[in-house]
Image (cartoon, grey):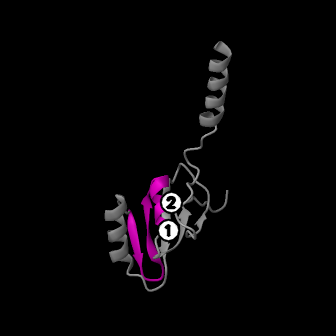
Amino acid sequence: MRRTNLTFLAASLLLFGCFDPTAPLQPPCREPAPLTGTFDPRVPDYIVIFHDGVDARQETTRLAAQYGFEPLGVWEHALLGFWAPLTREVVASLRCEASIKHVQHNAVYTIGD
């Protein structure tokens, strides 16, 4: 009996101890939009780019209402999209939206040393 409990504990630690809460979730569709970049806790939000011809303001408003996030900004001219703090679950779902071309982790860039 004691050995069974220890085996269960060891398996649980392996399973849950290796869980990475920043790892992307598998989207619930066959052909999700690409997710690029690497999670950086200094900038935990995402950049979402729409396909050409999408009304960025209108589509961002629709997606924010549907998925419950607050965009930090919207691009409507040379680039169509928005950036926002998103959960892994929302990122996975957004990647299945037909209007979205790709999703990217935000990043910090420095110039020089």
Proximity of marks 2 and 1: CB atoms separated by less than 8 Å: yes
Q: Which residue is mark 1?
A: 96
The local crowd at label 1, few if under 14, some if 14 to 19, many if 20 or more residues have their Cα within 10 Å, is some
Q: Which mark is residue 51?
A: none
- So how many labels did they put on this image? 2
The local crowd at label 2, few if under 14, some if 14 to 19, many if 20 or more residues have their Cα within 10 Å, is many
* Residue type at tag 2: Ala
Residue at image point 44% right, 86% down: 53
Q: Quadrant of the N terminus?
A: top right
Q: Quadrant of the C terminus?
A: bottom right
Extreme-bottom residue of the structure = 53
Residue 6 spot, x, y in % from top left:
65, 19
Residue nearest the observer in this picture, 108 or 81: 81
Residue nearest the observer in this picture, 99 or 85: 99
Residue 11 spot, x, y in % from top left:
65, 30
Q: Tell me if residue 74 is in the magenta stretch.
A: yes
Residue 75 spot, x, y in % from top left:
42, 75
Magenta part of the chain: 72-95
* Residue type at tag 1: Cys
Residue at image point 67% right, 23% down: 7
**Against 32, is 113 above or below?**
above
Residue nearest the observer in this picture, 39 or 16: 16
**Against 35, is 17 above or below?**
above
- SS at mark 1 in the image: loop
| Quadrant of the rendered image containing residue 60 | bottom left
Q: Which residue is mark 2?
A: 92
Residue nearest the observer in this picture, 25 or 45: 25
Q: Viewed as shown, does residue 70 lie left or right of 43?
A: left
Residue at image point 37% right, 63% down: 71
**Against 56, is 48 above or below?**
above
